[in-house]
Structure formats: structure tokens, C-alpha cells
Image (tube, rainbow, N blue to C red):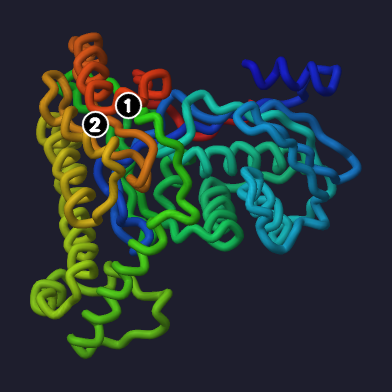
Amino acid sequence: MLCEERFRHVYGRDPEGKTFCPYRICPIGAHSDHNLGKITGLAIDKGIHMAFAPKQNGVVEISSLQFPKRAQWHIAQVPSKKQNDWADYLRGATLMLEREHRLKVGLCGVIEGTLPIGGLSSSAAVTIAFLSALCKVNDIVLSQQEIIDIAYDAELTYVGVSIGKLDQSCEVLSKKGHLLYLDTKDGKYELIPEHKDMLPWKIAIFYSGLEHSLVGSKFNMRVDELRAGVYALQAYAGLDYGKFKDAAARNVPREVYEQYKDRLPDPWRKRCEHWYTEFERVEKGAEAWRRGDLIEYGRLSFESGWSSIHNWESGAPEQIRLYEIMTQTKGIYGGRFSGAGFKGCCMALIDPAYEDSIKESITDKYLSSFPEMKGKYDVFICESADGVVLE
């Protein structure tokens, strides 16, 4: 890996450890986890690699092949507020881990991402890869749930993104050839294996060429609009409610939404419409996968993409065009935006027999619509993968 080569070049020795955390896709279940919904997801065989070695003086020194500046801090003196650079996720992870476990050893490391940033939860992947390495040098053993929770707290509390636990859960719990079916309300999950009669499939990633950042985007606003709708529904129905930040669609029955939805301002109603219909799509999608019906699972993923455009109202023009092309391309079972859907990429489950024609057709049509993306747009074919690995 290039990160190992860079480590040797910078530090003049071999790294003492390596870690890999996969990226993830969520074919059905988008914009749901932050309100305690259900999701289906898969880790993919592309992600974040990190080469590292311990530093006994407690200093953390990190560089990335994707970003120019090296970041540095001490495990006992992490800045209390984010510094507004790429390493904030890692500072947050250090701080959250220190609250639960005494840290004595720092590390030096080089991070490498194997796909362009945007839409595959690279922020969660880099956090988990780093967190695994920091635990390794400090002889700390975390459970899968502890890794998920600490990485989640780093992004929510320190970085300030109104996320749920979809990303972290997919990147830790996933198993190759299985669909992760997770209830984010209680953390219960199932790994549903491929059915013996399932059609062959691979994962295609169509990178739009747009860079992606959740912080400062409309992501947090969309979550607030959903919560506002839920808060109003509780009031209309005479339900008990507490603080706004604790409002969750999962705690308001679908029947209440149907009864009072016409009272909601249009943006709030649309956000709620997406959440409730996505909840149903996830349940139907899990059952379709269980019986090996990839056609139905793909149809539901396309439907999820439609709702993200029209009800969640996300999607840059480039992404929307990619989605539209995907729905009209032979050999694609289904797909949607990947990630928050304001920039980044689209994902699709495809028939491997059509891999070449899919790549050619979508590339031609997309670049005809957005010729300025030539040289930035790209296509990657992936397989499903296991969750985070520490070598």
C-alpha cells in the first residue's frame, strides 16, 4: 500500500501495525438512522488503510495521502473544540476514547483512502481505522459496540454532524456476502446471507466528481426539519414530548403521521414522508433479500432514491442525473445516492454480466450532460466485504 511506502519514507522504518476499515453503502435506509430507523447496508472492499507505529511520548502525528497538512496533538491535550480540518474526526475519537480509557501511548501514522471522498462514509471509516490503531498501541480491547459508539460520538459531539449510527455500524458489523439489517433504536441486527438462488451481483460506485462535506451542508437542516415535523405531530396528537433534540420519528406511530400530516408545513411533511416510507422499504427489502429476490430489493432501492430526491430533497444536479441514467440502464438491479446525497457518488447493485456495458453507457450519458466532469468522474466495481480489520 502507498501508505506503507510513505510511512517508510517519512519515518525511515517499517510501520509496526496496519489497519483497514471499509467504506459502506446503504441501498435502502437512507436518512433514517438519526431518528432511530432501520437500515440495510453493506461494507465494500474499498476503504481506509492506515500504517502506524507507537509514540511513547503521547504525541499523535497523522498525515493523509488525500490532504496536504500533517496534524499533531497530544493524547492528554486534545483541543476541546474542533480545528476545522480533516483531522477533527481523529481528534474527536482521541477525546472520546480518553474519557473511557486511560491513554498512555500516542502514534505516528499515514492514512490512505482507496476511493475519492464523498458519499461512502469515509469520515466514519477514517475514524474507525484510527481508533483501532490507537487502541492497539494502548493495549485497549473494545467491543464492536464500543467502537461504533465512540466513533459516533466523535462525529456527532466533536465534529457536529447530526448523524445516526448507520455508517459506523456498517463498517464494523458487516460480513462479506451478507446484508446488514440493523435497528438503530436498540442496536439489534441480523446478517442475512445470500440466498442460494440469488442472482449474481456486484456493487458499482459512480463518482460524480463533486467533493463532499456534511458539515456546513444542508444535511443538519434536513434532520432538523424532520425533527420539527415529529415535534409538531406529538403536540397535535397530545403525546408527551421533551426536548427538541430528543424527538424521533420512531416514537411517533405512522397512524399519527397520517392523521395530522396535512397540518405540517410542506418541508416538514416531506421529510416525515421520506422517513416513514423508508422505514417500510427497509423492512420489505430485508425480506426480499432473505428470499433471494434481488429484483425486488433493487426496485426498493430505486424507490428509496426517488424519495430522497422528492421528499428528502437532496441531490446535486449531477447526482440526480446519475440516478436517472441508472434507472434506465440494463443490468442494474437498483441503486441510489450514496451518503447524504448533496454531493459525492451514486451506488448500484449490478448484474456482473453487464459490467462493461453499464460502465460505458453511464459514462457516455453522464459526461454528455456534464462534460466539465471529464477527468473527475469515475466508476469503480466493488465486492461486499467484512467490517474493520486490524492486522
Tag 2's secondary structure?
helix
* Residue type pointed to by label 2: Leu
Front one among 224 and 54: 224
Q: Residue at x 64, y 26 (%)?
A: 65
Single out the residue that lies furthest toward the front: 372
User: In what quadrant of the picture does the N terminus appear?
Assistant: top right
The residue carrying mark 1 is 206
Front one among 221 and 9: 221
Q: Residue at x 33, y 39 (%)?
A: 338
When the figure is inspected, residue 245 is found, relative to residue 65, above or below; the finding is below
When the figure is inspected, residue 206 is found, relative to residue 57, above or below; the finding is above
Q: Earlier in the sequence, mark 1 or mark 2?
A: 1
Q: Residue at x 12, y 37 (%)?
A: 299
When the figure is inspected, residue 100 is found, relative to residue 69, above or below; the finding is below
Residue 95 on image: x %, y % = 70, 57
* Residue type pointed to by label 1: Phe
Asked if the residues shown at circle 1 and circle 2 are in contact, with their CB atoms under 8 angstroms apart, the answer is yes
Quadrant position of residue 361: top left
Single out the residue that lies furthest toward the bottom: 238
**Disc 1 and disc 2: Cα gap in Å?**
8 Å
Quadrant position of residue 52: top right
Q: Is residue 350 visible?
A: no
Q: Is residue 42 visible?
A: yes
| Residue 344 appears left or right of 230 | right
User: In what quadrant of the picture does the C terminus appear?
Assistant: top right
Crowdedness of circle 2 by 10 Å Cα count: few (<14), some, many (20+)? many
Q: Residue at x 54, y 60 (%)?
A: 160
Front one among 95 and 66: 66
Residue 347 on image: x %, y % = 29, 31
Q: Which mark is residue 322?
A: 2
Front one among 13 and 103: 13
Residue 63 on image: x %, y % = 71, 33
